[in-house]
């Protein structure tokens, strides 16, 4: 069975550009969450989506946005990139919106902003 | 707000040594608690979890007990192996405005020497 898949795995952008990261959850999982992991730190919560609706948002600026599609895949968009946006972006899926159980993580998209 | 604090690493042990990684949390509600592990070159994966006070999570020889009175969830293993070398993250998950969010500690890197 396929796990959580993310694309691209690596990308390099320059300041001010825009980036779109993509995530496909495990089959049957309806909830997708996005996390930012800066080198040497733990993942920081950005968004949770369930059934195409935003169900949670972390302390990130409005430059960060996301959406979920009818097939439960998701995109994370970041506008006006800053050097500080360089990080590993993790997508995690789970079955239910209010399930406080296990998150299944993809291997991440590593973004470098120059 | 909610937070997780875990001991700083790196922790370096010899094979068969006893491991403890301390984790404490602050939460407004009644969270579920987790330990996730990130092996070199791999994505985050759940190691163990506990959902209520005095629950003990266990997996692969690792154990942690949900201590509400001390707001702690320390990770222990009686005899570590070289293959346990990884970064360990303590995390809590709590329901939040129709969804849930998982908050991670900064991670503790473990090196096990043969």
Image (cartoon, rainbow, N blue to C red):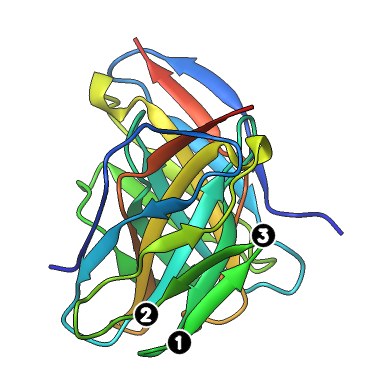
Same-chain check, marks 1 and 3: no
2 or 3: mark nearer the eye = 2
The residue tagged with tag 2: helix, strand or loop? loop
Question: In this rendering, would B44 be left or right of A76?
Answer: right
Disc 2 and disc 1: Cα gap in Å?
5 Å
Q: x and y percent of residue A64 in the render?
A: 31, 45
Task: Please tell me the numbered disc located at residue A89.
Answer: none
Q: Nearer the viewer, residue B103 or B111?
A: B111
Q: Nearer the viewer, residue A39 or B68?
A: B68
Dot 1, how many residues are within 10 Å of its Cα: few (below 14), some (14-19), or many (20+)?
some
What residue is shown at x 74% (from left), y 74% (from top)? A28
- Mark 1 = which residue? B55
**Are the residues flagged by discs 2 and 1 in contact, CB closer than 8 Å?**
yes
- Mark 3 = which residue? A25
Q: Nearer the viewer, residue A18 or B13?
A: B13
Q: Is residue A52 above or below residue A22?
A: below
The residue tagged with tag 1: helix, strand or loop? loop
Q: Nearer the viewer, residue A18 or A46?
A: A46
Disc 1 and disc 3: Cα gap in Å?
29 Å
Residue A9: tell me if it is visible: yes
Q: Chain of mark 3?
A: A
What is the residue that sits farthest to the left in this orientation? B1
- Mark 2 = which residue? B66
Q: Chain of mark 1?
A: B
- The count of marks equals 3
Dot 3, how many residues are within 10 Å of its Cα: few (below 14), some (14-19), or many (20+)?
many
């Amino acid at each position: 069975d396929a796990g959580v898949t993310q694309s691209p795995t690596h990308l390099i952008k320059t300041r001010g550009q825009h980036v779109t990261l993509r995530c496909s959850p495990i089959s049957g999982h309806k909830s997708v969450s996005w996390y930012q992991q800066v080198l040497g730190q733990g993942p920081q919560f950005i968004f949770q989506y369930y059934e195409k609706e935003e169900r949670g948002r972390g302390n990130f600026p409005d430059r960060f946005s996301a959406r979920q599609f009818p097939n439960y895949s998701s995109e994370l968009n970041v506008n006006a990139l800053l050097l500080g946006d360089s990080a590993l972006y993790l997508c995690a899926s789970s079955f239910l919106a209010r399930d406080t159980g296990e998150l299944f993580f993809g291997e991440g998209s590593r973004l470098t902003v120059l | 707000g909610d937070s997780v604090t875990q001991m700083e690493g790196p922790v370096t042990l010899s094979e068969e040594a006893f491991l403890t990684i301390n984790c404490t949390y602050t939460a407004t509600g009644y969270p579920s608690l987790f330990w996730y592990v990130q092996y070199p070159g791999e994505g985050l994966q759940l190691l163990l979890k506990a959902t209520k006070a005095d629950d003990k999570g266990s997996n692969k020889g690792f154990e942690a007990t949900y201590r509400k009175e001390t707001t702690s969830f320390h990770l222990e293993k009686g005899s570590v192996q070289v293959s346990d070398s990884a970064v360990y993250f303590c995390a809590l998950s709590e329901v939040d405005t129709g969804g849930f969010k998982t908050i991670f500690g900064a991670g503790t890197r473990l090196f096990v020497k043969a």
